[in-house]
Image (cartoon, rainbow, N blue to C red):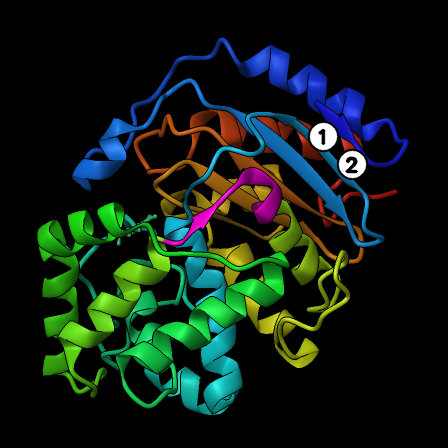
Amino acid sequence: DRETGSSPFLEVLKDLHSQYKSLQEGTVANYIPELAKVNPNLFSICIATVDGQIYEVGDYQQLFTIQSISKVFIYGQALEDHGRDYVLTRVGVEPTGDAFNAIILDEQSKRPYNPMVNAGAIATTSLIKGNGATERLNRLLEMYRRYIGRDVFVDISVFTSERSTGHRNRATAHLMLNFGMIDQNIEEALDLYFQQCSVMVNCRDLAVMAATLANKGVNPITKEKAVDSCYIKDILSVMYTCGMYNFAGEWAYKVGIPAKSGVSGGIIAVVPGQMGIGVFSPLLDGRANSVRGVKVCEELSQRLGLHLFECK
Ligand code: GLN
């Protein structure tokens, strides 16, 4: 365990880690064959504060693919590339109440419901600017670098595993192509989507990315601006209402802070003006959220009084 500052945070994290490490509920994601190989016991929790302190426990250096947590950051990039009004014509901001990979579009507008589910994320990914596939990928890797503070890479095994089995996402992309919601080459958009999901991060990276959002878009460790502060409210609003899929309402009620989960078992949570939280544990519940991750965040929110509407 590691501490780069003095605070009761580390004690709370150690407590939660030992309390939940024996919890064995849930199953690892197996619809992407490579993800099924993960060690289900891995478990780490990290807090990064906006003044640059880091508190971490467990397997915090373990790398894993970021999966759906990428959707948050790609949405920010799409907003920077095209502005709010245009992005809103391509993807809505309405929670679905359905599974993350549901093949559904808004009846009337034909837009995907929101950028935090697969349909909406594939649409936002297709908006990323760049001259050709390589430049678009490099722009996303460069964006991740600003949030994390180091270079990141795509895990080729997970990427090819998902590309060769991702028929559901391919079907979703075809449906959007049918309604003119995606206009670039959809195989290229899907490749970029699978690549953005296959970027390797550790739990500490998740906390720093979340802390960057908590810190108006400025990485609190490197002080580099990762995203224009004018889009922070867009990003955090959709995280708050849609970030935990069909558990988003209950999460908003119980935990009360913007968050995003991914099928590899990561969760990020953002306490604006205060801190970013990262949790990693691959065992997932029926809605594809990390079982221990949800428990840890519920309890952290309670113990530290993080709920946005807490009366203090
Ligand atoms: N790459 C995954 C998919 O598209 C991401 C899903 C997730 O993390 N919920 O199915």
Q: Amino acid at mark 2?
A: Gly
Q: As drawn, is 195 to the left or to the right of 142?
A: left
Outermost residue, top side: 22
Q: Which residues are magenta?
A: 199-206
Please name whichever residue, 246 or 170, is drawn nearer the observer in this view of the structure: 170
Whether 284 is among the magenta residues is: no
Q: Position of residue 16 (x, y in %)?
A: 65, 19
**Which quarter of the picture shows residue 170?**
bottom left
Disc number placed over residue 305 in the picture, else none: 2
Give the CA separation, mark 2 to mark 1: 5 Å
Q: Is residue 214 left or right of residue 5?
A: left
> Splitting the image into 4 quarters, where does residue 89 fall?
bottom left
Residue 227: assigned label: none
Q: Where's residue 177, x and y in %?
A: 14, 80
In-front residue for pair 267/41: 41
- Against 271, residue 294 (above or below) is above
Kindly identify which residue carries mark 1: 302
Residue 3 location, x and y as percent? 79, 30
Asked whether the residues under the numbered discs 2 and 1 touch, taking CB atoms below 8 Å apart as contact, a structural biologist would say yes
> The N terminus appears in which quarter of the rendering?
top right
- Nearest the camera: 290 or 201? 201
Where is 8 relative to 115, above or below?
A: above
Quadrant into which the C terminus falls: top right
Residue at 44 percent of width and 26 percent of height: 291
Q: Secondary structure at mark 2?
A: loop
